[in-house]
């Protein structure tokens, strides 16, 4: 469904991503692992049209190249980003935050239906629809951010470090939430520090090392790969 080819990003003279290639299919969870500064955020931002650097290459969604298109067009095409740090509006209610996610043309006409769909997927958001976002727990706020991205009715959800700052218990809930999203038929492209938990729910993974994708394998294989265990899983 999403097919990224030769994607490169430069910030001035600095090349942060070099000819990356990856794909995400419907109903698939794909995780990108890499050290700090490897270019994970850059990769997600370049796909979503919000990268400050110079982007070349292709990001094909159902055959349509999204590189160079404005972010709202990319949302309309069907890719939604849950950015690092969530980016929700703390003084607005859950419902107001969700409604703001329905700005794409394809979503605006069916805002009510999208709201119902998201609240059915995440009943907790329905129960808390009138609660002001800042009074929610970190895990609940992350669910609001994911719910808001789902309001544009995407086929691909890109998530940048969604478990950052969550307690182990809330992280567990988050990974459960991501499974629910996958079951709804979306493809997930996930950047995570929590390699073990993300590989446990993922289908495939890519290793990104200083701007280059060095390895691709099924998630179960990566979990038992000694080099991956040393680098990302805290030893064997
Ligand atoms: P982290 O896990 O620490 O967030 P990352 O893998 O997401 O790291 P990026 O944030 O994509 O890495 O950064 C990749 C490289 O690009 C880094 O060297 C970073 O300093 C550089 N970089 C990122 N954004 C910019 C920018 N707007 N201007 C200049 N350089 C940037």
Image: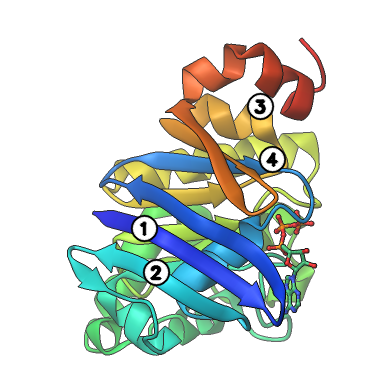
Residue named by callout 3: 196
Q: Distance of mark 4 from mark 1, alpha carbons?
A: 29 Å
Looking at the image, in which quadrant does ligand 1 appear? bottom right
Instruction: Report helix, strand or loop for mark 3.
Output: helix
Asked whether disc 2 touches disc 3, contact meaning CB atoms under 8 Å apart, the reply is: no
Image quarter of residue 84: bottom right
**Ligand 1 within 8 angstroms of badge 2 C-beta:** no
Residue 170, image x, y percentages: 71, 42
Left or right position of 71 against 196: left
* Mark toward the viewer: 3 or 1: 1
Q: Bin the neighbour count of mark 2 within 10 Å (Cα to Cα): few under 14, some 14-19, many 20 and up.
A: many
The mark nearer the N terminus, 2 or 4, is: 2
Q: Bin the neighbour count of mark 1 within 10 Å (Cα to Cα): few under 14, some 14-19, many 20 and up.
A: many
Q: Is residue 128 visible?
A: no
**Ligand 1 within 8 angstroms of badge 3 C-beta:** no
Instruction: Report helix, strand or loop for mark 1.
Output: strand
Asked whether disc 1 touches disc 2, contact meaning CB atoms under 8 Å apart, the reply is: yes
Residue named by callout 4: 171
Q: Is residue 58 visible?
A: yes
The mark nearer the N terminus, 1 or 2, is: 1
Residue 183, image x, y percentages: 32, 41
Task: Residue at 17% x, 65% y: name it.
Answer: 63
The mark nearer the N terminus, 4 or 1, is: 1
The mark nearer the N terminus, 2 or 3, is: 2
Task: Residue at 80% x, 41% y: name it.
Answer: 167
Residue named by callout 2: 57
Judge whether 172 appears above or below 88 on screen.
above
Task: Residue at 45% x, 68% y: name it.
Answer: 47
């Amino acid at each position: 469904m999403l097919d990224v080819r030769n994607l490169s990003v430069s910030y001035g003279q600095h090349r942060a991503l070099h000819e990356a290639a990856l794909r995400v299919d419907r109903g698939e969870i794909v995780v990108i692992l890499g050290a700090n500064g490897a270019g994970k955020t850059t990769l997600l931002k370049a796909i979503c049209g919000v990268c400050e650097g110079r982007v070349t290459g292709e990001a094909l969604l159902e055959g349509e190249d999204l590189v160079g298109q404005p972010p709202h067009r990319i949302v309309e095409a069907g890719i939604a980003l849950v950015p690092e740090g969530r980016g929700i509006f703390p003084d607005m209610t859950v419902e107001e935050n969700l409604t703001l996610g329905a700005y794409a043309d394809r979503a605006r006409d069916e805002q009510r239906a999208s709201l119902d769909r998201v609240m059915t997927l995440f009943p907790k958001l329905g129960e808390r629809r009138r609660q002001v976002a800042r009074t929610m727990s970190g895990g609940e706020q992350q669910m609001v951010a994911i719910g808001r991205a789902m309001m544009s009715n995407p086929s691909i959800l890109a998530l940048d470090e969604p478990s950052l700052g969550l307690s182990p218990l809330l992280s567990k809930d988050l990974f459960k939430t991501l499974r629910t999203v996958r079951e709804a038929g979306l493809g997930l492209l996930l950047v995570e520090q929590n390699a073990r938990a993300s590989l446990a729910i993922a289908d495939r993974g890519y290793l990104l090392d200083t701007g280059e994708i060095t390895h691709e394998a099924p998630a179960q294989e990566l979990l038992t790969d000694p080099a991956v265990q040393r680098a990302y899983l805290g030893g064997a």
